[in-house]
Structure formats: C-alpha cells, structure tokens
Image (cartoon, grey):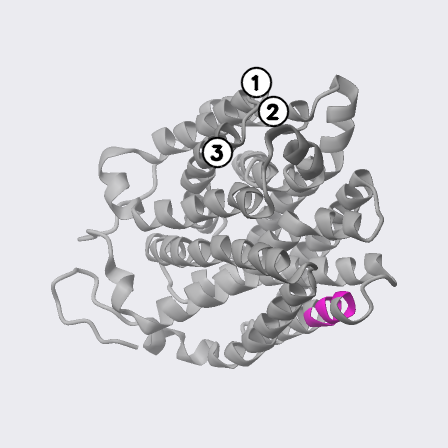
Amino acid sequence: MRAALNLLLVILLALNLRPILTSIGPLLEPMRASTGLGYQQAALLTALPVLCMGLVPLLQPWLRRWVSEHGGMLGGLAAIALACLWRLQLDSAWALIASAVVAGLGVAVVQGMMPGLVNRWFPGRLAGAMGLYSAALMSGGGLAAVLGPHISGHFGHWQAGLGLWAIPAVLAVLAWAVLRPRQEAPKLAGATGGHWFGTRRAWLLALYFGLINGGYTSMVAWLPAYHTEHGGSAQGGADLVGLMTVFQVAGALGLPLLLRRWADRRPGLWLALAIQLAGFLGLLLVPTQASGLWVAMIGFGLGACFSQSLTLTLEHLKTPAEAGSLAAFVQGIGFIITGIVPYITGWLRDVSGDFQASWTLLTVTVLAMLLVTVCFNPRGYAAAIARPAVMGKAAPVN
C-alpha cells in the first residue's frame, strides 16, 4: 500500500513540473499580439524558469539546513499554483516574465528533490521508477500544450490557457500534505554543500544532461512558432507538441523497460540519441514533409535520454543520500545550460529569419553527445566519481 501511495505522489508531483513551460508556445502569437513580446523576450518565458531549475538545486545543501523536505515541497508547489493564478490576471510582458520566475523557482525546489526521493522510495527499481517519473513529467507538459488553446478558446482569452494549471498544483499540495511518508530524507554526514564542483565526472554528467535537455526546451519554445511559419495553425502547433510528448512518454517508459537487465546505460543512450538525430536531420533537410514523423522521433529520443541520463547519474553512487546530492548538482548545472539553449536558438531565429540555424545547432549538439556517451562505462563509475565525504580534505579531480 505504501509503495502504491508513493507512486501516486511521484506522478502527481511530476505532472506539475512542465505546464509552466509547455503552455507558452501554443499561445505565443496571441500573447505577443496582446503584450508586444518579441521572440527574444518570449524566449525568457522558457529560459528563466529553466535557469531557476538550475540555480536552486545548487543551493540545496544549504537550503536543507533551514527548510525541511516537507516544507520545501509544499512551498514549491504553492509557488507554482500562485504563479498560475497570477497569470489569469496579467496583461503585460514584464508581469508575464515575472510570473515565469516565480513558477520556475517553485518547479526548481520540487524538481531538485525528486531524483533523491525516487531513489529512496524505490530501492532496487530505480530505472523503472525514474522512467515513470519522467513519463509523468512529460505527460503534464503535453497536456498543457494540447489543452491550452482549447481552454483559451473556451474562456475567450489566452490567460486562461496559462492560469488553470493552478488546479493540479493545488491538488498536489493536498496530496503531499496527506499522503507523504512521515520519514524525512536522511542527512548527509558532514555535508556542507558544494562537494561536486571539483569533480570532473560530475561536471561531465551535468553538461551531458544540460545539452540533451536543451533540445527539449528549444522544441517546446519554438516548435509551435515553426509550425505556424510553415502555414500551420496555433492548434496544429500545439498538437505537434502533444505528439512529441506521446513519444517522449513512450521513450521514457519503453527504453528502460526494454533494457532493464542491462547495467550499462550506453547502448540505450546511443539508440535514443540516434533516433533524435534522425528527427532533427528530417526537420533540417525536409522541413515541410513528414513533420509529424520527425517530431515523433525527436520526442522518443528526448524522453528516453531524460530518464536514462538521470538514472545514469544516480547509479554512480550507492547510497540514496549521496546519489540525490549528485543529482541535485547535475540538475543544477544542467538546467542552467538547458535554459540558455532555447535563448540561443531563439536568437538564431531572429538573426537568420528562419529556424534552420536553430535545428543545425541542435543536430550538432546531438552528434557531440553521441561521442561523449562513450565515457560512461559502469565499471568506471566508482573511480570517476570518487571524492571525500567531508569538505576540507584533499579532493581527487577526476
């Protein structure tokens, strides 16, 4: 019974971590017409929350001194709900950007805790549990993208498509308050934070995670605009994001299940990256043909890469507390990178006049990640990630 409740909580929490990003793209044109947002300003609506997702986990070792896991989770979910409610009322570009920061801070707090929480709640079933968490996270994003235009059309203004996502956030607050296990996360002995900054493997994992997910944030930010530039409708752009999400969920759940007996994550990551590469090449070379196929391939690759890269990070260490600390660092640095990528791709769109340069950048990034994946031999995890447990001792740089 406890395991089922934990699983329900993971799903409810994860569903709230992407609507603040994915609800923007399908409603971008009416938002721009109403508020005067340019493409670079619009990129901030994705980039700033993702940067928050990066900065807050880096502060987690210090924050945990003053804020409990329970308090942090409630505060993060409340920030998401309040930001969404604020969006029901706002009508200016800068208020919209400010709401993105508030929501991003809330998501950052919740998301930073999730890998360690999943690792602690589901020992021995990490790959499957991370796959389910990833699938729920992506499903929430897909629902927001697909339903946003319908909600806005029903209520007659675009703010409704952004603001009604306060409802699942409030439900998650109630579920966490009532259903959570009463045992808090164990403290890291001697932990004072910042341990991973001197470890090369931690930086490599963070760079890998960040660049892989930069493709996701870029697609969420610009796929609807790309679709409308080629003569499509706003709802058609939203449906493409929804299609991408369906295949993200398939990748996040299917690949870990297929490879559940494999200790080596590299074959799965190579396969996911290769599928993603084929999708980006399709958008780059034949942008007006079979766009649904290219988007589906990109989605499958992104979903599989997200769950597998988080699992890869957690498997570098044996204890849930240490693995959660490493995952917080990897997500911290990684999401800073992830937040910068859509801003760069939006800038490329502005200066070049189309999205071809943006897709070229993402294609080159995937090619680079295919090469980097060679480094992640599981036999070398312990040596690569070795570091002292207490700061102040000499730390080997790996």
Q: Is residue 252 left or right of residue 372?
A: right
Residue topped by disc 3: 103
The residue to which callout 2 is attached is 163
Q: Is residue 1 visible?
A: no
Q: Which is in the foreground here, disc 1 or disc 2?
A: 1
Residue drawn at (48%, 67%), measured in percent from left and top?
Answer: 208
Mark 2 Cα shell of 10 Å, populated few (<14), some (14-19), many (≥20)? many
Instruction: Of the two numbered discs 2 and 3 on the same chain, state the one appearing first in sequence.
Output: 3
Q: Earlier in the sequence, mark 1 or mark 2?
A: 1
Cα–Cα gap, marks 1 and 3: 15 Å
Bounds of the magenta segment:
277-283
**Amino acid type, label 1:** Gln
**Badge 2 amino acid:** Gly
As drawn, is 223 to the left or to the right of 290?
left
CB atoms of marks 2 and 3 within 8 Å: no
Residue 182's x, y, as percent?
38, 30
In the rendered view of the protein, which quadrant contains the N terminus? Answer: top right
**SS class, disc 3:** helix
Residue 89 shows which numbered tag? 1
Mark 1–mark 2 CB contact (< 8 Å) = yes
Q: At 67% from the left edge and 63% from the top edge, which residue is drawn?
A: 301
